[in-house]
Image (cartoon, rainbow, N blue to C red):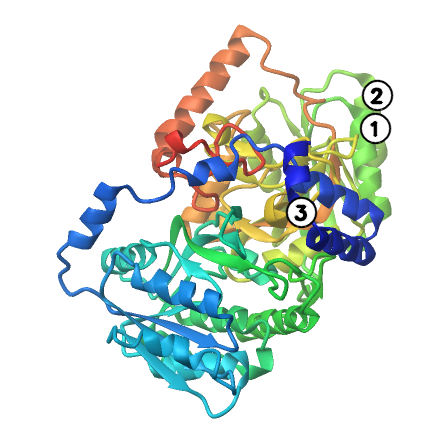
C-alpha cells in the first residue's frame, strides 16, 4: 500500500465519503475498495500527466494547420447556478482550444441569473460564444436540448458546466472527423480536483464496445455526435434525467454508421461535493434511470432480457432470456485423469438448472484401466457419449472431432479440469449466444484458491495474448469494474467457451496447425472477422485446475512446437498485434494483465 498517497488523501470530506461507502457496502467491500484505491501503480498517473501536455512545437503546429473544409464543432453547455470560478474556467478551456472552428452554446437555466449572466456576458465579445437565458429551469435534459437547438455546427459536443477540455480536445476530434467521417466520436477522460491541483482516476477506454455500454456508460465524456444524427434521434429525454447522456448514447449508436474512439485524455471531469464523479451514492435516481435506458435499448434491438443492478451504483448486468430450449453439445477432450473428469461431470449434473444438453467425451489415448472403466460406467447415460480420437494430442483436432458428433445448435468447449460454480451457467451463456450479433461467449474462471485464472483475453499481452486479472482475488472487481462487467472482447479461453453453430461452421472450426497454444485465440479472431461478437460473461463462474492434463512446455519438442505457434500468431495476426487490441487501450502496459498504465516513453 502507498501510505504517502493515503496520508495525502485524508481530509474531512474523504473521511465522510469513506463512512458513507462503508454503510452502503459493508466492511468486506469497503476493505477491498480501500486497498484498491491506494495500491502502487507501475507508473503514477500524476507522473504520466507531466508529459501529457502539448509541447510548444505541437501547440504551434496545431494552431497553424491549414484545414480544408474544417468541421464546425458546437460545444453545448447547459448551466445552472454554476459557481463563478467553475464557469470561467469552463469557458476559457474552450477559448484556449488549438482548433478555431467551434462555437460555444450556453443555455442558462439558473432562474436567477444574477450570478451567471454577468460572467458569461464578459465573454460574448468572442462571437463564437452564444448565450441564451431560459425562462425557467427545464431540467438537465431539456436545458441541454435548448443548448443543442442553438447549435449550427457539423458536430455537437456535450460539455458539463463545471468541467474542462484539454486544449487539443477539439483539434483531435476534428482530425478524427475529417479522417474517418465518424458519426459519433468519444475520447478518454480523467477526474480533476475542484481546485485543479490534481488529475487522477483516468478512464482509458476501449474502442466501441456494445456490451460494456450496456453494463455502464463507459463512454461518458467527451461525447461528440454529428448534428444531423442528434437531430434524427430527437435529443435528450427528460424522463431519463440523471442518465440522459447514457440513454441518448444508445439511440445514437443504434443509428450511427461509424463510431470512433480517440485514446487520449481530452476531458477533465471536475470533482466536488455535489458531483456524481466523486459521490456515487448521491444520485440513486440516476442509476435507476440508467437501468431503464439499458432495458429500452435492448428491446429496440429486438432482444429480451432482465436488467439488474450489480452491487456498484451505475453498473448493470443483463440476463438475456433463453428462447425455446435449444440443445447444447458439451465437448470435453480427455486423457486419463478419470477423477478430474468425474468431478467435472458431477458438477454439471448436480448444479446445472438447464437440462437440455449432451456431453461428448473425446477420448485421446488414455492408458489407465480406471479411465476406461469410468467410460464404461457413463457412456450412454445422462446424455454422455464417449468417442475415440486415436491420433496424437491436438486440442484443435480433438474439438473438431467432437463437433462432428455434436447435434446441438450451441457448442460448449469445456476442459475436463473445470467444475461448475454457477447453477444457471448454461442459461446465462445460451441467452448471450442467441443474440444475433454474438458468436462466442466466454466466462470467468478461478483457481482453487479463489483467485482469478481468466477474465477474458487481451491480444498483445505478454507478446501474443493473455488472460486478464490473473491472480487477483475473487472478491475484487478490477480496473473500473472490468472483471465483473459483461463486455465484448477479442478473445476468451476455450476452457469454457460457448459457440453458435453458425459461427463455428463459418470458420471451419479450430485451426489444427495450432495443436496446443493460441488455438482458442485464433478461433475467436477468425469468428470476429466474420462479423460476430465475442462476449465475456462474468456472471458465469467455474473453477479451473489448469494444466493438470497436458503438463508444461518442458521438453525441446514442446518448446519448438510452442515457438512455432507463436510465430504463426505473429504472422497471421500481425495487424492487431501491431495496432493494438481494439478492446484495450494503447495507454495500458502489455507487460501486465491488470490495466496497468504504460510508461509514457512506450506510448504510441
Where residue 211 appears, x then y in whole percent?
Answer: 55, 58
Say if residue 258 shows up in the picture. Answer: no
Determine whether 285 is above or below 314 in the image.
Answer: below
Residue at the top extreme? 556
Sequence-first disc among 3 and 1 = 3
Name which residue lies at 72% across and 55% down. 17
Where residue 601 appears, x then y in whole percent?
Answer: 38, 30
Label 2, residues with CA under 10 Å away: few <14, some 14-19, many ≥20:
some
Q: Is residue 310 left or right of residue 141?
A: right
Label of residue 329 in the image:
3
Of residue 494 and residue 115, the one placed in the foreground of this image is 115
Name which residue lies at 39% across and 28% down. 570
Label of residue 594 in the image:
none
Sequence-first disc among 3 and 2 = 3
Of residue 281 and residue 161, the one placed in the foreground of this image is 161
Disc 2, disc 1: CB below 8 Å?
yes
Q: Is residue 431 left or right of residue 569?
A: right
**Of helix, strand and loop, which one carries label 2?**
helix
Residue that carries the numbered disc 1 in the rendered image: 374
Disc 3, disc 2: CB below 8 Å?
no
Residue that carries the numbered disc 2 in the rendered image: 370
Name which residue lies at 51% across and 86% down. 112
Where residue 246 appears, x then y in whole percent?
Answer: 53, 68
Residue 454 figure quarter: top right
For the C terminus, which image quadrant? top left
**Of helix, strand and loop, which one carries label 3?**
strand
**Of helix, strand and loop, which one carries label 1?**
helix
Amino acid at each position: 500500500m502507498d501510505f504517502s498517497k493515503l496520508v495525502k488523501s485524508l481530509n474531512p470530506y474523504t473521511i465522510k465519503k469513506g463512512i458513507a461507502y462503508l454503510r452502503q457496502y459493508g466492511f468486506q467491500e469497503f476493505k477491498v475498495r480501500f486497498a484498491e484505491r491506494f495500491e502502487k501503480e507501475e507508473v503514477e498517473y500524476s507522473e504520466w500527466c507531466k508529459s501529457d501536455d502539448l509541447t510548444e512545437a505541437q501547440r504551434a503546429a496545431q494552431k497553424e494547420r491549414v484545414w480544408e473544409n474544417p468541421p464546425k464543432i458546437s460545444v453545448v453547455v447547459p448551466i445552472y447556478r454554476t459557481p463563478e470560478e467553475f464557469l470561467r474556467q469552463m469557458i476559457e478551456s474552450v477559448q484556449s482550444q488549438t482548433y478555431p472552428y467551434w462555437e460555444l452554446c450556453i443555455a442558462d437555466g439558473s432562474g436567477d441569473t444574477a450570478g451567471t449572466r454577468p460572467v458569461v456576458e464578459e465573454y460574448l465579445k468572442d462571437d463564437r460564444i452564444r448565450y441564451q437565458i431560459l425562462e425557467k429551469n427545464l431540467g438537465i435534459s431539456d436545458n441541454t436540448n435548448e443548448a443543442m437547438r442553438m447549435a449550427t455546427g457539423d458536430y455537437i459536443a456535450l460539455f458539463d458546466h463545471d468541467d474542462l477540455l484539454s486544449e487539443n480536445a477539439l483539434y483531435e476530434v476534428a482530425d478524427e472527423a475529417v479522417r474517418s467521417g465518424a458519426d459519433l466520436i468519444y475520447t478518454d477522460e480523467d477526474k480533476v480536483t475542484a481546485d485543479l491541483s490534481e488529475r487522477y482516476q483516468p478512464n482509458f477506454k476501449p474502442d466501441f464496445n456494445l456490451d460494456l455500454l450496456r453494463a455502464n456508460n463507459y463512454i461518458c465524456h467527451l461525447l461528440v455526435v454529428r448534428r444531423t444524427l442528434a437531430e434524427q434521434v430527437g435529443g435528450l429525454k427528460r424522463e431519463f434525467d440523471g442518465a440522459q447522456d447514457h440513454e441518448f448514447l444508445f439511440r445514437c449508436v443504434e443509428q450511427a454508421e461509424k463510431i470512433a474512439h480517440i485514446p487520449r485524455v481530452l476531458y477533465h471531469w471536475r470533482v466536488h461535493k455535489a458531483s456524481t464523479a466523486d459521490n456515487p451514492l448521491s444520485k440513486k435516481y440516476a442509476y435507476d434511470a440508467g437501468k431503464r435506458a439499458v432495458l429500452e435499448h435492448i428491446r429496440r434491438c429486438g432482444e429480451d432480457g432482465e436488467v439488474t443492478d450489480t452491487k456498484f451504483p451505475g453498473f448493470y448486468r443483463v440476463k438475456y432470456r433463453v428462447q425455446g430450449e435449444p440443445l447444447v453439445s458439451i465437448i470435453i477432450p480427455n486423457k486419463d485423469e478419470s477423477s478430474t473428469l468425474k468431478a467435472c461431470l458431477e458438477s454439471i449434473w448436480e448444479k446445472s438448472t438447464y437440462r437440455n444438453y449432451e456431453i461428448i467425451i473425446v477420448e485421446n489415448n488414455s492408458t489407465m484401466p480406471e479411465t476406461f472403466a469410468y467410460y464404461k460406467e457413463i457412456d450412454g447415460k445422462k446424455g454422455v457419449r464417449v468417442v475415440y480420437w486415436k491420433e496424437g494430442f491436438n486440442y484443435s483436432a480433438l474439438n473438431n472431432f467432437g463437433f462432428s458428433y455434436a447435434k446441438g445448435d450451441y457448442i460448449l468447449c469445456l476442459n475436463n479440469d473445470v467444475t461448475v460454480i454457477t447453477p444457471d451457467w448454461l442459461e446465462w451463456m445460451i441467452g448471450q449466444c442467441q443474440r444475433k450479433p454474438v458468436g462466442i461467449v466466454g466466462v470467468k474462471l478461478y483457481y482453487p484458491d479463489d483467485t482469478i485464472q481468466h477474465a477474458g483475453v487481451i491480444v498483445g499481452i505478454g507478446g501474443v495474448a493473455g488472460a486478464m486479472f490473473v491472480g487477483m482475488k475473487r472478491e475484487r472487481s478490477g480496473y473500473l469494474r472490468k472483471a465483473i462487467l459483461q463486455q465484448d472482447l477479442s478473445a476468451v479461453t476455450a476452457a469454457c467457451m460457448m459457440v453458435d453453430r453458425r459461427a463455428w461452421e463459418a470458420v471451419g472450426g479450430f485451426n489444427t496447425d495450432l495443436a496446443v497454444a493460441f488455438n482458442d485465440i485464433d478461433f475467436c479472431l477468425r469468428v470476429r472477422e466474420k462479423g460476430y461478437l465475442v462476449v465475456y460473461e462474468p456472471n458465469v463462474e467455474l473453477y479451473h485446475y489448469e494444466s493438470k492434463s497436458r503438463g508444461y512446455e518442458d521438453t525441446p519438442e514442446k518448446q519448438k512446437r510452442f515457438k512455432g505457434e507463436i510465430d504463426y500468431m505473429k504472422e497471421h495476426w500481425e495487424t492487431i498485434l501491431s495496432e493494438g487490441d481494439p478492446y484495450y487501450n494503447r495507454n495500458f502496459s502489455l507487460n501486465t494483465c491488470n490495466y496497468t498504465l504504460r510508461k509514457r516513453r512506450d506510448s504510441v
